[in-house]
Amino acid sequence: MWECESSTLGRVTVYSIQGCPHCIQAKATLRQLGVPVCDVDIGIHSELRAKVKELTGRSTVPQIFFNNVHVGGNDDLQKLDPAELRRLVTLVREEPLPADALPLPEKNQPDDTAEETDRDFKCERDELADLVEDLKHGSVIGSHRRGLTVYKKSFSGNQLVDWLQKERGMARAEACHTAQAMLQKKYMVIVQGGGQQDGSFDEGKDTMNTLYRLLEDDPHSALNAGQTAACTAIQAAELSLLLREMILKLFSEHLSADGKSVDYKGMSVNPAFERYCELAIQLQRVELLSLSREEKLAFFINIYNALVIHGYLRLGAPTNMWQRYRFFNYVSYLIGGEVFTLQDIENGVLRGNRKGVAQLRRPFSKTDPRLQMALPDAEPLIHFALNCGAKGCPPIKTYTPQDIDTQLRTAAEAFLENDDGCVIDSGKREVRLSQIFKWYKADFGGTDEKLLNWVLEHMGDSPKKTSLQGILSAGKTKVSFLPYDWSSNSFH
């Protein structure tokens, strides 16, 4: 997507992405100046990212040009000397755009992303959905005792097979096959006994006496629970991209005019949010076991970022340390038949099942089925893709499996360009880093030396990188950590 206000002479070109508060702030300031603005979303037109990086030497957005004069990001715009700002405004108003004008998307290039973002999820009803609906209203589901424990809203394998034979007229073999399909498709879960998740649903004692429960009746606090996902399961990567695009578009619509706050209350009553919630239900039965490393990275990063916003809308933004601890250990989605909290996604899946901040144990035990989802090693680059709050955003907000490592490196590079990510004090031979590097130091090598080398390796070519190289070569570099801004951006 790109929009240009008409102008017979020059223009201000802003390279931005959707949902970037700093881009919104910059464009609000430019509107007040009364200059023609051309807004180019390089989250959509990714073919321009490399050119913008070449022109500016930066990986962050927004990047602002008055005609062909590069101003920088939003902070640079806000700090411009008034006399210099007047000169630039005059330049745009009175001088034509130079012949070597800045790159824009081609006029005949299709803008598919706008359609993709606005498209409605088309639900193809799963072949077992009607059967499950009938089962909910049958006489099978009830309370069952095993020892001293009563399992409410449960049924045995034998009861289910008998019901399929009696109510659906199935032969015994067909009924067993159908029951196994219900289990494999995550319509029901085991609540007591052995059972076989992957084997045949047969006449074996363990299988037929095992107690099951419909997934929607399983008690948990997941934000997408309480209703059965009745649609045919779609691919995990496609679903996560759809969800992230929907919540990001909704987020953008409720950013204040200056980009500094979000009207979460307004978001929560927007009909688009209800459509988002309906789509999030489809996560319940998504297939995860076959995902590659790249697919897992893209899927869980997108879902994590969407879940944070969903959690804000349902529970409000946490305002103190205890609330933050509860938020990240409570806010969850039901994904592929299992509950994943924010903490489970970050530390369990994306960090290779490592203890998180203030965690006494790893998220997944050796017998936890979610352990199958954990990446084999910690992925340090994910820390710059999970809801980055830096003053400049990476030029991407949704992640795709294709070229995911390059996307994550770009996000890290953008984070390190900002002073809330990394500050170099050559005089004191000191490097001040975000608290992220302190909290997850083990992911970056575990020592100050390895940490600094990691930072250097992931910086773009810039004066900041040159400064860091200089103090590292001199030796005895001091490492300290910047305060972390936990303030909420809620409008209310």
Image (cartoon, grey):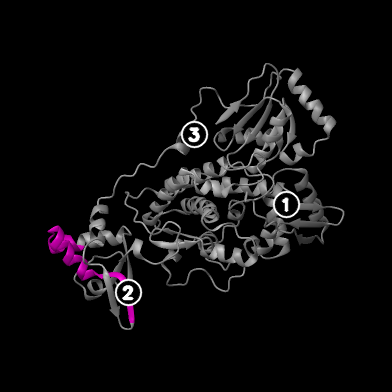
Within the magenta stretch, is there residue 166? yes
What secondary structure is marked by label 3?
helix
Q: Nearer the viewer, residue 220 or 103?
A: 220
Task: Kindly identify which residue carries mark 2.
Answer: 151
Label located before the other in sequence (3 or 1): 3
User: Where's residue 74, x and y in %?
Assistant: 71, 39
User: Where's residue 469, x and y in %?
Assistant: 78, 51
Task: Kindly identify which residue carries mark 3.
Answer: 114
Instruction: Give the residues in magenta.
Output: 149-176
Q: Is residue 341 visible?
A: yes
Quadrant of the frame with the N terminus: top right
Task: Kindly identify which residue carries mark 1.
Answer: 420
What secondary structure is marked by label 2?
strand
Label 3 neighbour load within 10 Å: few <14, some 14-19, many 20+? few
144 left or right, relative to 305: left
Q: Amino acid at mark 3?
A: Ala
Q: Amino acid at mark 2?
A: Tyr
Distance between mark 1 and mark 2 Cα atoms: 51 Å
The part of the image, by quadrant, that contains residue 449 is bottom right
Label 1 neighbour load within 10 Å: few <14, some 14-19, many 20+? many
Q: Nearer the viewer, residue 425 or 111?
A: 111
Residue drawn where x is 65% and y is 34% of the image: 52
User: Where's residue 13, x and y in %?
Assistant: 67, 29
